[in-house]
Image (cartoon, grey):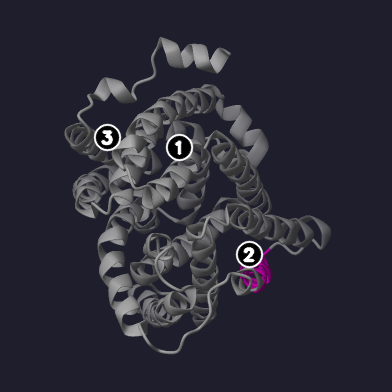
Amino acid sequence: MVRRILQNFATRFATALLSFAIVWFTARYLGASGRGAVSLFTTDCAALLLFTGLVGGSSLIYLSPKRSIWHLLPPAYVWAVVVCIAGTLAVGLLRPVPITYLGHLGALSLLQAFFTINTLLLLGRKRETTYNFLTVLQVTLLAGCLLLAFAGLAWREVPVYYYATYVAYGIPLLLSFIALSRLPDRWAGGQGLRETTRELAQNGRGAHLSNILAFANYRLSYYFVAHYVDAHAVGVLSVGVALAEAVWLIPRSTALVQYVDLVHATDKQAQVAPALGVARLSLLATGAGVLTLSLLPASVFMAVFGPEFGAARSVIILLAPGVLAIASNIMCSTYFSGLGQYRTNNISTALGLAVTVPACWLLIPKLGIQGAALASSLSYLASMAYLLRAFGHATGTGVEALLPNRTDLQRVTQ
């Protein structure tokens, strides 16, 4: 397990570095307003992808060991088309955006949805090396295309991000089809397709609802800031959020491996002890990362991203407690997802959303992006309180089982 965790961590670390480069490119060459426009577009895409996940999300990992991938692909693809078309129309009705924006939103969200479906199926079949390669390739292509356009061709407009995204997802998508074709599964006609579709939808609703609610907790503040302040403020907020959330690559790397193992394991209880050990080390590393970011002076952010981004430091400081809370949440929610007990995760994220909405409404008009960061931390802490309590009852462990101790510190130093 340790080797696989390290491989996933290395992949996510490389992805985080390249994602940081993308944030830097868009902030440095497009300014705060351009960065804000890109952030709103990526948030719109992510929202549509979340709803495609109701049928084509983590339930694909859960069902891929039991079903033919060629029975899982059709319903996931059809649902993705429906969601991306309907979601694009909804964005056009809810916000005054150009028709070209909607065209890119629909096409790119669908491209990303297909890529996500294919890679999740590969991950469900434990093709983790291929999954990691395609993930890193995608973000590498995006960063490379942006660098070429911004620095090489001096083409510094927001639409450059759209064109780079077509390349970044199109090539890995084609490669993912090749990888899927090499699996031993074969199309056996329509027999069992209806049953697979029904099971995929039933499992997906429970499994993915918490992801939708969590996304609202993570990104709803962007829309509040855009409404009450402006796109410039969204750009500064997005830089602070991107840096703080980059620290989550540590718990997410371990959680990904543990989820796959838990789904395949016959003795679920035996997975608790190793998961707790890894969770403590993840929390320790996450705390170190957050502390390092919080200690950086505002001048560093201004020097790296531009003079408009000094306020990103205050965003990171206010987000720090929430980032630590989510690190614990990731490990606990992975356990319940692996058992198929999605109700617990849904309640946790719903509780966080119940805090997010009024907090954004009250704090952002008065405090701006600092209010957005504070609202997020309050939401994450509320979710953590419930989830830790539920995890303790389910496993018979206390909160101290997730807190790093002297033995963990010794393991790190050794």
Q: CA distance from mark 1 to mark 3?
A: 17 Å
User: Dots 1 and 3: beta carbons under 8 Å?
Assistant: no
User: Dots 3 and 2: beta carbons under 8 Å?
Assistant: no
State which region is magenta. 157-176
Camera-side residue of 40 and 338: 338
Determine whether 316 is above or below 40 in the image: above
Secondary-structure class at tag 1: helix
Q: Earlier in the sequence, mark 1 or mark 3?
A: 1
Q: Is residue 152 left or right of residue 283?
A: right
State whether the magenta stretch is mostly helix, strand or loop: helix
Q: CA distance from mark 3 to mark 2?
A: 34 Å
Q: Which of pointers 1 and 2 indicates the residue nearer the eye? A: 1
Q: Report which residue position mark 2 lands on.
A: 161
User: How far across and down, in percent of the image, does residue 347 sit?
Assistant: 19, 49
User: How far across and down, in percent of the image, does residue 7 sit?
Assistant: 61, 41
User: Dots 1 and 2: beta carbons under 8 Å?
Assistant: no
Secondary-structure class at tag 2: helix
> Which kind of residue does numbered mark 1 sit on?
Pro
Q: Earlier in the sequence, mark 3 or mark 2?
A: 2
Q: Report which residue position mark 3 lands on.
A: 381
Q: Report which residue position mark 1 lands on.
A: 251
Q: Which of pointers 1 and 3 indicates the residue nearer the eye? A: 1
Q: Point out the residue furthest to the bottom here.
A: 189
Q: Is residue 136 left or right of residue 85?
A: right
Q: Magenta includes 75? A: no
| The quadrant where residue 373 appears | top left
Q: Is residue 343 left or right of residue 414?
A: left
Mark 3 neighbour density, 10 Å: few (under 14) some (14–19) many (20 or more): many
Determine whether 10 is above or below 36 in the image: above
